[in-house]
Image (cartoon, rainbow, N blue to C red):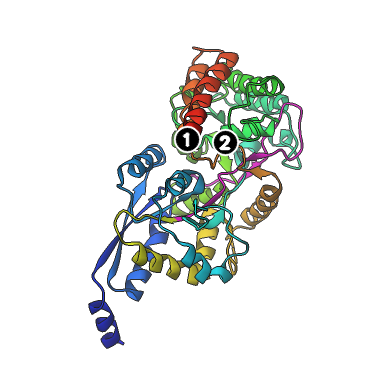
Amino acid sequence: SSETTTDTQEEHEPVTLTVWFYADPGKEEFYQKWFEAVHEEYPWITMEYEVLPYESGPEKVTVAYATNTTPDILLDGYSRIAPAVNAGITADVTDVIEEYSDVFLAEQLDGKMADGNYGFIAMTNGAPYGILVNMDLAEQLGVADLLPEDKTLWTYDELLEICRAAEKANPDVIPMGLFAGSQSSDAWYYSWFLANGVDLCNEDLTATAFNNDENREKSLQVLDLFKTMVDEGLTADGCATLVDQDIQSLWGTGNVLMLAGAWNNMSTYYVQQQEGTCAEFNYDIYCIPTAEGKEAPDVACWGSSGVAVFKNNGNEEAAKLAIGLYLADPAYQTEYCSLFGAIPVTAGTNITYEADWITEAMEFGTAYGAEHAVSDFGIIEPWWTEFRGTFYPQLQDFYVGNIDAQTLLDNWQTSGDAVIRAANEAE
C-alpha cells in the first residue's frame, strides 16, 4: 500500500547507487528496467549508471581501484574484478550468495577473498572465442565451400586459401579483420596461441612460457600467419592502429568476411541487425584453425562475469538489496542471456532466440566451451590487467614491420615476466 511505502521510505535515508558496466548494444535499456524495479521495490534507493567504453574502461577501473573512487556496483568479467577482490576493496557478498543459493546451478568458483568469503557474484560463464564468418559474403565471393564442414577442423593454409580467394574475387573486401590498436578483445589473440598448443604461462603461473623451447615454434607459426595476412593485404589497411571496435564497425557494413569474436557475439550482432545499426546478413562462427588442423582446439575464456560491490561509499547494504532483487527474478537472467548470448550459471534461465540458426550456434558454443574454453593460463590472476599491456604494443610494431616475430616474443617475454615477478614479490 502507499501508506506502507511511505513508512518504509521514512525509515531509510535516501541512497544513490552508482553502477558501472561496459558499452554493449542494448545493455543500457536492459539494466534500466532493473534500476527502475529496484526503485519501485525500495523507494529510497536510486541507481545511476555510467557506461564504460572498452578502449578506456579497463584503465578507468584500474585507476578507481588504486584511488578508492570505485562505483557502488561494477558489472564486469571476473578477470578485471579479481584485482579488487584480492586487494580487499570489494564488499563481502557471501550473505547474498547464501540467501539465493538455490538460484545457482553450482558452487561459486570465482570471487574468494583471503578469508574464504566472497567478494564477487558470478552470473554467467564466459563464451569461447572463434572466428565469425559473413556467410552471405562467403557465397558471393565463391569461398563458402572452402570453409570446414564441421566448423572445427581447418589449417592455417586452408584459412589463407580462403582469404586469398576472397581478395582475388573482390579486392575491396576485407578477408580477415585484424587489429592491434589496443588491448581490447585481446583474448582472441591469446586463443590463437592456445589453440595451436602454446602454453602462455608456466604451470604455477610464475613466468611466461610462450617463448620456451617447446612453445616457441608454435608461437612463431601463429605470428607468421598474421604477418602473412598483413603483408599480402588480406586485412584492413592500418590494422596496427585499429581497435576491435573499428573492425566491428567495418563488419557492420557487410564488407568483412571473417572477424574475431566469441560465441556470445552471435547474439550481439543479431541484436544490432534488429536495431538497424548493422547491415543484415547471415553469419556463423567457426573454431579457430591451427597449423596442423587440430579438431576442436582449446581457446581462451574470460571466466565468469558478474557483479562486485565496493565498500568505499558505505552503500553495501543497499547494493545487496538491489542485487538480490535481480537474482530473485529469473526473467532478468533469461533476458540477459538471450540478448547477449551469455552462458548462465543460474537455474530457471530458459534462453530463447528469435532465429533458429543462433539457437543452434549457441548450443554448439555452450557444449564446445564446456570442453575447450580455458581461463587457467593467467587470465584471472591479479597481474593479468597489467600483463595485457605487454602484448599489443609488440603486436603493433610487428604489424608495421619494426620487429620480427622472434623479437616480438623476446620483448613480450621480458616485459611479461617483469609484471608477473613484481606482482608475486608484492604479495
**Is any atom of residue 141 visible in this view?**
no
On the image, the x and y values in percent for residue 77 come to 49, 48
Circle 2 is placed at which residue position? 188
Q: What element carries label 1?
A: helix
Is 357 positioned to the left or the right of 275 in the image?
right
- Asked whether 356 or 152 is in front, the reply is 152
Please state which amino acid type lies under the numbered disc 1: Asp
Q: Which amino acid does label 2 sit on?
A: Trp
Q: Is residue 158 left or right of residue 354?
A: right
- Report the magenta stretch's main SS: loop
Which residue is pictured at 33% across the width and 44% down the height?
64
**Residue 312 location in percent, x, y?**
31, 53
Count of marks overlaid on the render: 2
Q: Which of 250 and 305 is in front in this view?
A: 305
Crowd around label 2: few <14 · some 14–19 · many ≥20 (10 Å): many
Residue 209: quadrant of the picture? top right
Q: Where is residue 35 in the image (x, y as percent from the top left)?
A: 36, 65
Q: Earlier in the sequence, mark 2 or mark 1?
A: 2
Q: Are marks 2 and 1 in contact (CB under 8 Å)?
A: yes
Q: Give the range drawn in magenta.
A: 279-307
- Frontmost of labels 2 and 1 is 2
**Element assignment for label 2:** helix
Find residue 224 and report its image quarter. Answer: top right
Q: Does the magenta stretch include residue 302?
A: yes
Write the residue at 69% across / 30% down: 196
Judged left or right of residue 350, residue 268 is left
Mark number displayed over residue 244: 1
Which residue is nearer to you in this view: 140 or 312? 312
